[in-house]
Image: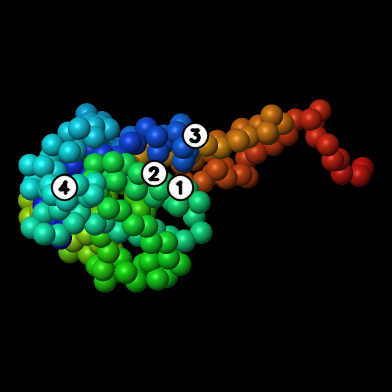
Amino acid sequence: PALADRGTRRALSLAVDRARLIDTLVFGYGRPAQSAVAPVCWNHHGDLAPDPYDPAAARALLAAAGWRDGDGDGVLERDGRPLVLEILLRQGDPVRETGAVILRENLRAVGADVRLRALELGAALDLLGSGRFDAYLGLVTLNLYGDATPYLHSTAVDRFNQGAWADAVVDSLLESALGLRDREAARSVWLEIQERAAADPPAAYLFYPEVLVGVGPRLQDVRPHMLSPFNNLAEWWIRPADRRYRSSS
């Protein structure tokens, strides 16, 4: 119920320090996110701005949404109910566990009582599938086509739209984009989809991590791909002078 209104969701997104998450979790190799469609995809909307870190604006939005700290305990209330939020995450993932601690600190600073619940993957997915959760710290993974239907379409609650976000116009636009053969025509529809979703995001998108690949100096013609560092493994070679092991004559 705490996340049922747009103002509260936007406020909590503004309370998140995405730069700190990037610096702490991926050592600076990332950029703040603003869409379910990542920059590596052809239909990514690069002109959309991610939510800034603005705790003051977050507090103002929460106040406008009716949240007040009536008893002075640091936790906001509305209609007699405290702003309590449980973040569900997968157990045994140190990146997510550390990220959840940062999120808890960020959200507590604007008046939310945040609890963390780390579960084994199967148990976490069971709660996600049933809708019995407040928030989930997870990963958005798209194919290179950039089809965000599993995250944005109202009927995709059994896939990755576990928050049951629904927008009839976005549903129609998704179906239209997938039916267009002309790339530029389809791209304009995808941009419109992202613009509409940005007005009331289905999730607080945090950051796009960069994929880092280390290559030894002896290896030649290594061309890693975003889907696999072993993209052209059959074409790798080592100069004769750099070879450490030689076959017998």
Which residue reaches farthest right?
249
- Which of labels 4 and 3 is toward the front? 4
The answer to whether mark 3 and mark 1 are in CB contact below 8 A is no
From mark 4 to mark 2, how far is it between C-alphas? 22 Å
Q: Which of 148 and 99 is in front in this view?
A: 99
Q: Quadrant of residue 185?
A: top left
**Quadrant housing residue 85:** bottom left
Which sits earlier in the primary sequence, circle 3 or circle 1?
3
Q: How many labels does the image show?
A: 4
- Judge left or right: residue 52 versus residue 143: left
Left or right: 13, with 5 as reference point: right
Q: Mark 3 points at which residue?
A: 27
Q: Name the residue under label 4.
A: 69
Residue 243 is labelled as none
Graded by Cα atoms within 10 Å as few (under 14), some (14 to 19) or many (20 or more), the crowding at tag 1 reads: some
Residue that appears at 27% across and 33% down: 53
Q: What residue type is labelled 4?
A: Asp
Give the labeled residue for mark 2. Answer: 102
**Figure check: 92 above or below 197:** below
Of badges 2 and 3, the one in the foreground is: 2
